[in-house]
Image (tube, rainbow, N blue to C red):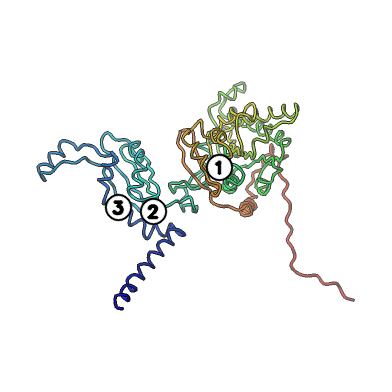
């Protein structure tokens, strides 16, 4: 009886702790990592660092001076030297550690062994980032941060034309920087999270001194809720055919302003102008314009010869904006479910000007290849494996060849519309876009008091 009581007294708390740890790991992975995962991974890393580096081929032969000193002091066998390890820095999602590479090593050698390091140290992911020549930083992520997205407190935003819109798989924020990547292509099937990505962009730019314009050929169901903050909105191909020439004319007027300021001859072609609006004085600098194009395939579809001529004109104007708009402070965010060469003439040329690529879950592999195949072929397979039960998950790539997985946090249409309503007074007044300014219905307050009929 005494043995049974002892077993209950000892085993009960142990079972409770085990059940609690399992619950935390399943429901609250961040809390589990902070209490259990991080100490265990830190002990495992420190205790096995040398042997793991040797197994991964990340050690080098010691220098002759070091070898002589070891033999003279200890008379033991001289072992290969791993990269010098810095201090462990815990974070809310993992660990960070800096390594000073040994002579003859490069960051690619460490990156090639990232999967081995992940299994050896029992973490969810290991990511390598060069800090300076000879020094790299290992980012160890303790759990799947993309399962329940929580943006970091310091998301890296706050700058002009910089919007943190998603979380990367290495627990850092993905920031959409229009000054670094002026134009972007965003693809995604229905319910893939593409609209969520668009909402975050619009609400992030709504608080900045930027003019927002939209082309939504789905009768405006995606962009109409943000009408209070939009300077222009086209809800069908006919209106888009009128808005795009206005934007092209605005771009040409801005080039004339740059030429007049810098003393360039009026006959100089636009393609030969290398300066931009950011070189103008702040008092003369025109406000930037961000054009959102939702369902870009609707602009390519034609049903008659007349529609075909209109399509060719719109595509030509879009290509001109993509080629020359950056210097004039005009940026494009092109979205769609499907994008391929079969859309018609100009589709491939337009894609070539969109240096940023975001691919959510798509219905076919050619769409993923169209989005990522020309800049990061390895990312096509990752984009094709996105599960339907993870909306907002996407693969982002750029012209440097790098790519990563991101996921956008949930943002309801009502919250995004309320944000645009609050910042409606920041919408700049552009005469060129005034004819396309969407009509905003006036919301009248509802009286909560009941009226009573007058009595004699």
**Residue 244 in the figure: left or right of residue 396:** right
Secondary structure found at label 1: loop
Q: Between disc 3 and disc 1, whose residue precedes?
A: 3
Q: Which of the labelled discs sits on residue 218, or is there none?
A: none
Answer yes or no: is residue 284 visible.
Answer: no
Residue located at (59% from left, 22% from top): 268
Residue 14 falls in image quadrant: bottom left
**Residue 423 in the figure: left or right of residue 438:** left
Q: Which of the labelled discs sits on residue 91, or is there none?
A: 2
Question: Mark 1 or 2, which is nearer the eye?
Answer: 1
Question: Mark 2 or 3, which is nearer the eye?
Answer: 3
User: Which part of the image, by quadrant, shows the N terminus?
Assistant: bottom left
Residue 127 falls in image quadrant: top left
Q: Position of residue 386 (x, y in %)?
A: 52, 44
Considering every residue shown, the one lying at the far top of the view is 267
Residue located at (21% from left, 36% from top): 61
Q: Position of residue 264 (x, y in %)?
A: 57, 24
Q: Which of the labelled discs sits on residue 44, or is there none?
A: 3
Between 140 and 228, the one lying in front of the other is 140
Residue annotated with mark 1: 361
Q: Between disc 2 and disc 3, whose residue precedes?
A: 3
Residue located at (60% from left, 37% from top): 334
Q: Badge 3, how many Cα within 10 Å: few under 14, some, many 20+?
A: some
Q: CA distance from mark 1 to mark 2?
A: 30 Å
**Residue 4 in the figure: left or right of residue 232:** left
Between 156 and 46, the one lying in front of the other is 46
Answer yes or no: is residue 157 visible.
Answer: yes
Q: CA distance from mark 2 to mark 3?
A: 17 Å
Secondary structure found at label 3: helix
- Asked if marks 3 and 1 touch (Cβ < 8 Å), the reply is no
Secondary structure found at label 2: loop
């Amino acid at each position: 009886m005494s043995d049974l009581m002892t077993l209950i007294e000892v085993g009960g708390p142990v079972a409770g702790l085990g059940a609690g740890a399992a619950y935390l790991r399943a429901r609250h992975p961040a809390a589990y990592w902070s209490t259990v995962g991080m100490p265990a991974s830190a002990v495992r890393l420190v205790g096995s660092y040398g042997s793991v580096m040797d197994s991964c081929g990340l050690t080098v032969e010691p220098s002759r001076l070091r070898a002589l000193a070891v033999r003279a002091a200890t008379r033991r066998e001289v072992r290969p030297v791993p990269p010098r390890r810095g201090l462990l820095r815990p974070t809310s999602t993992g660990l960070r550690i800096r390594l000073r590479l040994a002579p003859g090593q490069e960051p690619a050698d460490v990156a090639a062994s990232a999967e081995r390091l992940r299994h050896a140290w029992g973490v969810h992911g290991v990511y390598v980032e060069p800090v300076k020549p000879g020094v790299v930083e290992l980012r160890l992520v303790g759990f799947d941060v993309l399962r329940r997205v929580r943006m970091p407190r310091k998301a890296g935003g706050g700058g002009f034309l910089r919007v943190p819109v998603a979380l990367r798989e290495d627990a850092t924020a993905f920031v959409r920087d229009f000054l670094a990547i002026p134009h972007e292509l965003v693809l995604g099937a229905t319910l893939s999270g593409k609209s969520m990505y668009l909402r975050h962009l619009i609400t992030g730019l709504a608080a900045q001194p930027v003019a927002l314009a939209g082309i939504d050929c789905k009768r405006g169901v995606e962009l109409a809720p943000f009408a209070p903050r939009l300077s222009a909105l086209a809800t069908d191909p006919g209106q888009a055919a009128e808005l795009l020439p206005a934007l092209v004319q605005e771009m040409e007027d801005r080039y004339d302003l740059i030429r007049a300021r810098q003393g360039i001859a009026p006959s100089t072609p636009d393609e030969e102008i290398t300066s931009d609006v950011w070189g103008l004085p702040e008092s003369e600098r025109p406000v930037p314009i961000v054009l959102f194009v939702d369902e870009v395939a609707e602009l390519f579809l034609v049903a008659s010869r007349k529609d075909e001529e209109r399509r060719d004109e719109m595509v030509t104007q879009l290509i001109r904006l993509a080629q020359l708009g950056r210097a004039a402070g005009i940026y494009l965010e092109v979205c769609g479910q499907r994008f391929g060469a079969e859309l018609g003439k100009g589709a491939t040329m337009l894609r070539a000007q969109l240096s940023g690529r975001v691919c959510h879950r798509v219905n076919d592999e050619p769409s993923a290849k169209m989005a990522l195949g020309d800049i990061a072929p390895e990312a096509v397979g990752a984009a094709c494996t996105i599960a339907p039960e993870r909306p907002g998950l996407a693969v982002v790539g750029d012209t440097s060849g790098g790519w990563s997985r991101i996921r956008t946090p949930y943002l309801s249409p009502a919250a995004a519309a309320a944000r645009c309503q609050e910042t409606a007074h920041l919408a700049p007044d552009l005469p060129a876009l005034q004819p396309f300014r969407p009509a905003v219905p006036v919301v009248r307050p509802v009286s909560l008091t009941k009226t009573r009929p007058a009595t004699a």
